[in-house]
Image (cartoon, rainbow, N blue to C red):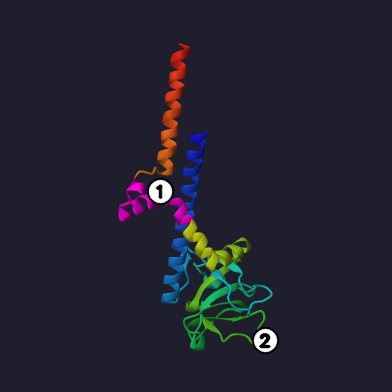
Amino acid sequence: MKKVIRKAKSIINVLLLVVIAVLAISIMMSLVARINGTAPEFFGYSIFRVSSGSMEPELMVGDVILSESTVDINGIKPGDIVTYRGSGNLSGKLITHKVITAPYEEEGETFLQTKGTANEVADTPISADRVESVMICKLTFLNKFYDFFFSSWGLLAMVALIIFVFVDELIVFIKTVTGNQSMKNRESINEIIERLQAEEAEQNKEKSNKNE
């Protein structure tokens, strides 16, 4: 039973480490992308979170969408939802709107026109090189995940996960820093499990010898 518990703890620790690593990488890539004014990209795909109501009710504030970053401009058609870099007052921001005019040539440059579903006026035509990605679908299951992990409670949960995974290492660290002799004599969780397993094995061996 103790062996099963130990294996289960190891598996849980590995899974938690993966979750922490993915979250840390996602946050770092998002921060770097925002600083550079680009979209965070993962293997040719980008994840965006809707922050305004310009596309309601099609896309609500807080919705998470998956978009393909490798854009074939000639493949874009009216009805597609694209994310592009803003200009003028919106310079440095990423805008996600629906295409209302397919790509067209003008003075040797390719343009297309978009419009927010909730907006009355269409956007100014944008050049093709400003298009970052084309939306594939909404990731509804990620909405609450984002809400939680980007909240104060989510931050506390992240810290709790890290403490849970590295509890043994933290105990050793505290022992080293404080030099507390009473703490040095305490066993870690893994040491206790190993001692109990050794005692159980010894007892089984003694029983086996008596039966012989």
The residue type indicated by label 1 comes to Asp
Which residue is most to the top? 212
Q: Is residue 177 above or below residue 12?
A: below
- Report which residue position mark 2 lands on: 120
Indicate the amino acid at tag 2: Glu
Q: Nearer the viewer, residue 57 or 193?
A: 193
- Can residue 181 be seen at all in this image of the molecule? yes
Residue at label 1?
Answer: 168
203, above or below 122, in the image:
above
- Alpha carbons under labels 2 and 1: distance apart: 59 Å
Residue at the image position 40 percent from the left and 48 percent from the top:
168
Q: Secondary structure at mark 1?
A: helix
Find residue 177 and report its horizontal and vertical position in percent: 31, 56
In the image, is 76 to the left or to the right of 176? right
Give the residues drawn in magenta, as a range.
161-184
Left or right, 40 with respect to 114, comes to left
**Which of the 4 image quarters holds residue 147?**
bottom right
Q: Is residue 6 above or below residue 52?
A: above
Residue 180 percent coordinates (x, y): 33, 51
In terms of secondary structure, where does tag 2 sit?
loop
Residue 179 lies in the magenta stretch:
yes
Question: Which numbered dot is residue 188?
Answer: none
Q: Is residue 182 left or right of residue 54?
A: left
| Tag 2 near tag 1, CB within 8 Å | no
Magenta segment main secondary structure: helix
